[in-house]
Image (cartoon, helix red, strand yellow):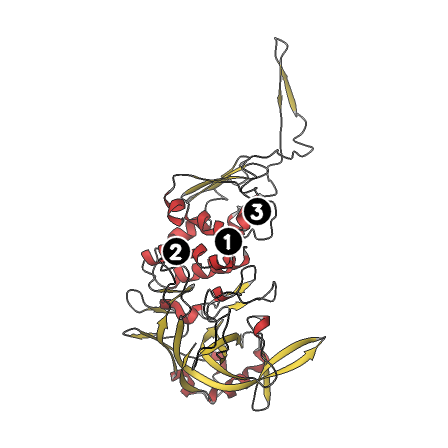
């Protein structure tokens, strides 16, 4: 389906329609200014021609302006564009005409314009369609930064069938691969794996794991759509040759099928005697993510897994009740740091043992994956010897507790963990 939109000469979008029965056309709602003529030309033969004006800027323009970044998830007047499938179709289409309730809007890879010209060729010049075209042709972190933006927006949109989560992005993933992005695994990229793992759901929306299997716990695709998603910010990148890259830390190295990155504490933490930590590594040992069907970028098999060697320390979960709600903390050596689970349904109980794996830096602060022994997700049984992701926490949110985290990292040991 994605290739149809990508190769079409023109895509006609009934953006105002709530479903396929509504069609493109609607009666325009006129303002008081535009409902009466501002000038009437009286012809000599007794005829008259009325001229009307309407406000230059329509209310829907903000959702087509470059600054909107395709963010229409809360706009009930453009229901088509709040759908997950429509995002890649809109980006892939070379040119599209949108039928809104107020006017027509033209979108192509160089301009976005409308009938009243408020979106003129200057203000509507650079937008997501053009940025996508340019970014996927670049090497290094630029294409992955844009992928993070697309992913964040996509997860805020709605899909009817949760099993469509990855297929509804497969067209964009194929374009990334065609431009050298490398191996794709359940919404993440092998060449950027240590940046892609640093996703975190926001507190808005229902953070719910998909009822039926569609992705492993380390992928954002294991959560239902309709949530706010934060992606790890890339702090530095070095190229490792065709198809390789690392997104966190400095001096990334690759050996065969392995990707390794240095784990460095920020310079502001140099007052602590932790020089040996700066020489530790996180290494991608294995990434196994076979498709469950013919589409290599679509649904994935339930055997998907990732194996990483990285600094790991053990801890337990402490639960406090605050305002009637459980407030969870990671506890070690009598000290605690707050922690949020990816999903409310995955919340561990008091005293639950967890592993904390340092896999990179989020906004230049150590980011820790919190893992628990496999219990089975989305209807699957537990996997012996494996772990599942519970969530992630970073010192970016805990600046006053940096010393506690550093004390924990001193005790971390390199372990190889399958997730």
Name which quarter of the figure residue 176 lies in. Answer: bottom left
Residue drawn at x 38%, y 39% is: 9
Looking at marks 2 and 1 on the same chain, the residue that comes earlier in the sequence is marked by 1
**Which of pointers 2 and 1 indicates the residue nearer the eye?**
1
Position above or below: 241 against 382: above
Residue 279 x/y as whole percent: 38, 84
Residue 166 x/y as whole percent: 44, 59
Looking at marks 2 and 3 on the same chain, the residue that comes earlier in the sequence is marked by 3
Tell me whether the residue at label 3 lies in contact with that at label 1, contact meaning CB atoms closer than 8 angstroms. Answer: no
Please name the residue that numbered disc 3 is placed on.
79
Asked whether residue 247 is in view, the answer is no
In whole angstroms, how far apart are the C-alphas of marks 3 and 1? Answer: 11 Å
**Which of pointers 2 and 3 indicates the residue nearer the eye?**
3
Residue drawn at x 48%, y 68% is: 232
Residue 390 x/y as whole percent: 52, 75
Tell me whether the residue at label 2 lies in contact with that at label 1, contact meaning CB atoms closer than 8 angstroms. Answer: no
- Front one among 370 and 40: 370
Position above or below: 204 against 275: above
SS for dot 2: helix
SS for dot 1: helix
Q: Residues within 10 Å of mark 3 (few under 14, many from 20)?
A: some
Q: Which mark is residue 135?
A: 2
Name which quarter of the figure residue 246 lies in. Answer: bottom left
In whole angstroms, how far apart are the C-alphas of marks 2 and 3? Answer: 28 Å
In whole angstroms, how far apart are the C-alphas of marks 2 and 1? Answer: 21 Å
Please name the residue that numbered disc 1 is placed on.
84
Asked whether residue 294 is in view, the answer is yes
Residue drawn at x 62%, y 27% is: 52
SS for dot 3: helix
């Amino acid at each position: 389906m994605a290739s149809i939109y990508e190769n079409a000469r023109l895509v006609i979008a009934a953006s105002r329609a709530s479903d396929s029965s509504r069609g493109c056309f609607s009666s325009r709602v006129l303002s008081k200014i535009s409902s009466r003529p501002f000038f009437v030309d009286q012809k000599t033969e007794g005829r008259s021609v009325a001229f009307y004006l309407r406000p230059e800027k329509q209310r829907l323009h903000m959702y087509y302006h470059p600054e909107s970044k395709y963010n229409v998830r809360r706009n009930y007047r453009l229901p088509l564009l709040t759908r997950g499938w429509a995002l890649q179709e809109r980006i892939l289409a070379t040119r599209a005409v949108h039928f809104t309730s107020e006017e027509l809007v033209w979108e192509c890879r160089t301009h976005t314009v409308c009938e009243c010209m408020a979106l003129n060729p200057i203000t509507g010049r650079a937008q997501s369609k053009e940025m996508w075209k340019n970014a996927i042709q670049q090497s290094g972190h630029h294409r992955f930064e844009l992928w993070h933006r697309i992913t964040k927006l996509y997860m805020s949109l709605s899909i009817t069938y949760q099993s469509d989560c990855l297929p509804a992005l497969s067209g964009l993933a194929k374009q990334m691969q065609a431009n050298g992005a490398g191996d794709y695994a359940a919404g993440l990229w092998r060449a950027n794996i240590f940046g892609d793992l640093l996703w975190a759901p926001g507190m808005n929306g229902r953070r719910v794991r998909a009822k039926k299997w569609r992705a492993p716990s380390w992928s954002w695709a294991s959560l239902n759509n309709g949530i706010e998603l934060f992606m790890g910010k890339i702090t530095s990148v070095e190229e490792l040759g065709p198809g390789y890259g690392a997104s966190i830390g400095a001096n990334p190295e690759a050996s065969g099928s392995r990707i390794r990155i240095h784990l460095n504490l920020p310079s502001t933490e140099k007052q602590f005697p932790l020089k040996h930590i700066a020489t530790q590594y996180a290494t991608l040992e294995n990434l196994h993510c076979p498709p469950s069907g013919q589409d290599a970028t679509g649904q994935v098999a339930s055997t998907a897994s990732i194996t990483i060697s990285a600094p790991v320390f053990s801890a337990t979960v402490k639960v406090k009740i605050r305002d009637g709600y459980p407030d969870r903390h990671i506890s070690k050596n009598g000290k605690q740091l707050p922690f949020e689970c990816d999903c409310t349904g995955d919340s561990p109980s008091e005293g639950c043992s967890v592993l904390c794996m340092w896999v990179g830096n989020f906004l230049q602060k150590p980011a820790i994956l919190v893992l628990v022994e496999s219990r089975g997700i989305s209807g699957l049984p537990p996997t012996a010897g494996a772990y599942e992701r519970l969530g992630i926490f970073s010192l970016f949110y805990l600046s006053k507790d940096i010393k506690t985290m550093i004390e924990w990292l001193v005790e971390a040991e390199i372990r190889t963990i399958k997730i």
